[in-house]
Amino acid sequence: MIANRLERLVPIVGKKTVARWIDAAARADHDTMITELLAAHYDPLYARSIERNFPAIRTLSSPRCTISRPGFSDAGAHSHRQRRTGPTRRLRERARMTDYAFRIVNVFAETPLAGNPLAVFEDARGLDAETMQALALQFNLSETTFVLPSDRATAHVRIFTPTFEMPFAGHPTLGTAHVVRAISNAGDDVTLDLKAGIIPVHADGDVWTLTANAPKHRPPAASRAELAAMLGLDAGDLAPAPPLWVDTGSEQLVIPLASFDAVRRAAPRAEALGVHGSNGARAMAYVFARDEDHVLARFFFKKHEAVIEDPGTGSACANLGGWLLATHAALPQRLTIDQGEAVGRPCRLGLAVTQEQHIRVSGRVIELGRGVISL
C-alpha cells in the first residue's frame, strides 16, 4: 500500500527518490523516509502531493509508532527512542505546520531591481486578519497581499500595509493580478475582488492595466499658503490649478506644482502633514508637475511621526486621473509618470483617461523571487 502511494509521486520527485523511499519503507527505516518527506515540504507542490498521496506520514510519525532495529533488545529500543525524542517531536511539530507560498514582484519596474516591491501570498486560506497584518509587518514592504477564493471575481484579495488594511492600492492590484494569472491560468483578463469593489485588470505581456473606480473629489480645508508650507515650499511653487482630495478607491490629497524643480525640492513637515494632509484616517500628499505628456510625481505619507516616501503609487496615479476629470481637462489624456527618483527605486507608470472618462493605470510587473513561510 505504501509503495503504491509513493509511486504516485514519481512525476513530482523522480523515480530514484521514490525508489529510495520504497526501500526505506521495506526496511522499516521510517525515520529516514519521514525526514525526507518532511524536508520536501519546502516546496508547496511537493507538500500538496505528499499530503494527498501519502497520508500515512502522520501515522508513521505519531507517538504510537514503534521503531525497531535489528540487534536491539526491547530495553535498547526504548533507550534509542528516548535519545531521539527531540528530533521526533520536531518532525511531528513540522508535520502539523502549514506552508504558505509567496512571491516577490516589482511593480512599475523597467528593470528587475526597480519599481515598487510587493509580496503576494498565493493561497491565504487559513490565515486570519491578525496573522495577515503580522505578516505584512514582517515583510515591511509598502503592501503585502493575500489571495483568497471569490465567487464573483477571479480572486478575492486583501491588501495590508505594515500597519493597516487598505481597500484599494494600485501597485498591489497590478502585482497580484500578475501572480493570479500565473497560479490560476486565468489568461490576460483578471478581476480582483477588493474592499473597494471589483477591479478589472488586463495584461499585455507583463504590462498590466487596471480600470479604476469612478472618482469623487472635494476641496481641501487648508489654504494654498498652508499647503505650500506643509511641503516646505513657497506659495509660488504651487501651480495655478486647484489642489483636491480625490478618491478612486483610496482618498488622497493631490497637489499640482509649478515645475519639476518644485517636485524635487518638496520636503513635507510631519506635523503639518498630519494637520493639513489628513483625511481623519491617514495623512498623505501626492505632488506632481507636468511637461506636456510627461509627469514627475512624488507621494508622501506619515508613519510613526515620520514622513515616508512611496516609490510608486498606482492609487495616486488613478487619483491624478480623477483630478484631471475634476478640473475639466481635455479628453482623452495619456500620460507617462515617473516616480521614485528621490528614493532610488525608479518607477514608470502609465495613465490614460478615455473620452468616456474611464481611468486606467498601467505598469510592468517583474517577478523577482519565491518562497514559503511555515506557520
Image (cartoon, helix red, strand yellow):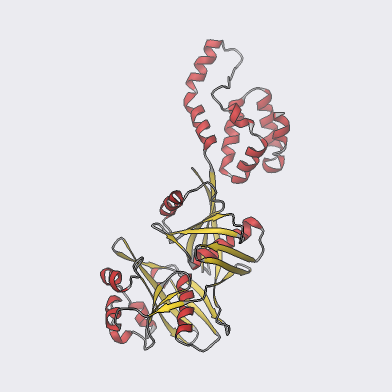
Image quarter in which the N terminus is found: top right
The one nearer the camera, 188 or 29, is 188
Q: Position of residue 254 (x, y in %)?
A: 40, 77
Q: Position of residue 268 (x, y in %)?
A: 30, 73
The one nearer the camera, 16 or 221, is 221
Q: Residue at x 34, y 84 (%)?
A: 238
| Residue 168 higher or lower than 263, as above or below | above
Which quadrant of the figure has residue 264?
Answer: bottom left
Q: Position of residue 308 (x, y in %)?
A: 35, 66
Badge count: 0
Left or right side of 16 for 129: left
Q: Residue at x 60, y 17 (%)?
A: 69
Q: Position of residue 242 (x, y in %)?
A: 38, 85
Q: Residue at x 52, y 11 (%)?
A: 75
